[in-house]
Amino acid sequence: MRFACIVFPGSNCDVDMYHAIRDELGEEVEYVWHTETNLDSYDGILLPGGFSYGDYLRCGAIARFSNVMEAVKKAAQEGKPVLGVCNGFQVLLEAGLLPGAMRRNTNLKFICRPVTLIVENNETMFTTGYDPKQEITIPVAHGEGNYYCDEETLKKLEANKQIVFKYKNNPNGSIIDIAGITNEQGNVLGMMPHPERAVDELLGSKDGLLLFKSILRNWREAHVLTS
């Protein structure tokens, strides 16, 4: 499986994402600069965390206009897995690939620590490696991770099982403890915690590695002939 790791000016978790895919998952991955306009040769798209364009104006609000985002939208429409982590999640929201918006943490402070997540939906292409309601440890690092949506959108998220991860102890004020959601088709996931920073016990947890293994396993079952 071949992944594209999208890099915007200000991305700073791209190296962690690259390491997770190449060294821990054992799959091919390439850095792709934000000016690229074609992602057809990639099987999966990764939007890492950081501070795209310095997060000036609003997190992800400038990155959404990057040339590469039209190619990301095309990949999403084709059903390819698209994962946005932290700033990548914010970019997906700003680009309209996921519903809702992100606000400042309720305490107005930057939070950087491991948190416990609850796997709300283990039937997506990103989470089949987990058990239902499994508790996992993955770190967060953000000042603007307070996910919000209106009541109508929230009902749709719940009805379509688009809420994938919730916080056990909500660190940022996110509505009904949401930590990660998918689009209606289930192939675009945005989450504030960093699975790429939880891929080895030396990092304090390897719970994030199961997310990447889930992507790989589901892709192989869909695209690789075994007989």
Image: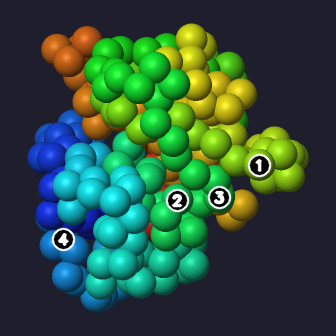
Residue type indicated by callout 2 = Leu
Q: Give the number of the mark in front: 4 or 2.
A: 2
Assess whether mark 3 and mark 2 are in contact (beta carbons under 8 angstroms): yes
- Measured in 3D between alpha carbons, the distance from the residue under mark 3 to the one under mark 4, in whole angstroms, is 25 Å
Q: Compared with residue 17, is residue 71 higher up or lower down, i.e. above or below?
A: below
Q: Is residue 137 visible?
A: no
Q: Quadrant of the N terminus?
A: bottom left
- Measured in 3D between alpha carbons, the distance from the residue under mark 1 to the one under mark 4, in whole angstroms, is 34 Å
| Numbered circle sitting on residue 93 | 2
For disc 1, the marked residue is: 150
- Residue drawn 48% across the image and 83% down it: 74
Q: Give the number of the mark in front: 2 or 1.
A: 1
First in sequence: mark 2 or mark 3? Answer: 2
- Measured in 3D between alpha carbons, the distance from the residue under mark 2 to the one under mark 3, in whole angstroms, is 6 Å
First in sequence: mark 4 or mark 2? Answer: 4
- Residue drawn 15% across the image and 47% down it: 12
**Which of the two residues, 207 or 165, is positioned nearer the viewer here?**
165
| Numbered circle sitting on residue 99 | 3
- Measured in 3D between alpha carbons, the distance from the residue under mark 4 to the one under mark 2, in whole angstroms, is 20 Å
Percent coordinates x, y for residue 54 in the rendering: 20, 55
Count neighbours of disc 2 (C-alpha within 10 A) and say few if under 14, some if 14 to 19, many if 20 or more. Answer: many
Q: Give the number of the mark in front: 3 or 4.
A: 3
Q: Is residue 102 visible?
A: yes
Residue type indicated by callout 1 = Asp
